[in-house]
């Protein structure tokens, strides 16, 4: 708002152009800083919030359902692009693929992958 107000204020440009230029350049520099910093920090923050102690069993269920839904949509889109009909009965939240496992049936110590084949 401040940047738009200063750029559009004709009387400020006439009365005190130096101050107006400083305010405009400061706002532009601040916006550029945000544009450079935020895209790097937001994913890092999201990844950190996905780690314990912020993740509980209910959050794991939601993450698995979201992952399965994303896989189903992606599979449907891929099949639509090839002109074939999508078969999604194998990818429902009640029947997840074996490689993801079901968190409610596993102990926390079993949740980590020990080998690539078990993932």
Image: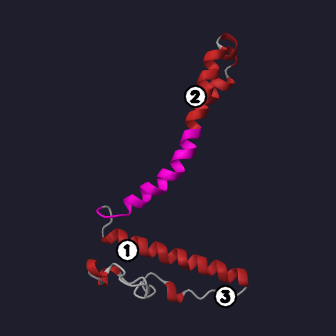
Q: Would you say 29 lies left or right of 49 here?
A: right
Give the x, y percent position of residue 102: 36, 83
Q: Which residue is mark 1?
A: 61
Q: Residue at x 48, y 74 (%)?
A: 67
| Numbered range of the magenta stretch | 32-53
Q: Residue at x 40, y 87 (%)?
A: 118
Which sits earlier in the primary sequence, circle 1 or circle 2? 2
Estimate the spatial distance between the alpha carbons at disc 3 and disc 1, rounded to whole Å: 28 Å
Judging depth in this view, the residue of 88 and 64 nearest the camera is 64
Judging depth in this view, the residue of 73 and 29 nearest the camera is 29
Residue 21 lies in magenta, yes or no?
no
Q: Would you say 115 lies left or right of 38 here?
A: left
Categorize mark 2 by other alpha carbons within 10 Å: few (<14), some (14-19), many (20+). Answer: few
Does 117 appear above or below 7? below
Give the x, y percent position of residue 1: 58, 31
Q: Secondary structure at mark 2?
A: helix
Q: Which residue is mark 3?
A: 85
Residue 34 lies in magenta, yes or no?
yes
Give the residue furthest to the front.
115
Judging depth in this view, the residue of 105 and 22 nearest the camera is 22
Give the x, y percent position of residue 54: 32, 61
Categorize mark 3 by other alpha carbons within 10 Å: few (<14), some (14-19), many (20+). Answer: few
Q: Secondary structure at mark 1?
A: helix
- For residue 26, the mark is 2
Residue 1 seen in this snapshot: no
Magenta span: chief secondary structure? helix
Does 33 appear above or below 51? above
């Amino acid at each position: 708002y401040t940047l738009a107000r200063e750029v559009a204020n004709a009387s400020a440009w006439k009365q005190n152009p130096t101050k107006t230029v400083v305010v405009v350049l400061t706002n532009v520099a601040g916006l550029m800083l945000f544009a450079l910093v935020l895209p790097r920090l937001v994913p890092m923050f999201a990844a950190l919030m996905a780690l314990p102690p912020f993740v509980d069993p209910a959050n794991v269920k939601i993450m698995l359902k979201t992952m399965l839904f994303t896989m189903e949509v992606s599979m449907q889109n891929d099949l639509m692009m090839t002109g074939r009909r999508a078969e999604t009965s194998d990818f429902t939240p009640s029947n997840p693929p074996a490689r993801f496992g079901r968190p409610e049936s596993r102990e926390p110590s079993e949740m980590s992958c020990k080998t690539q084949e078990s993932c």
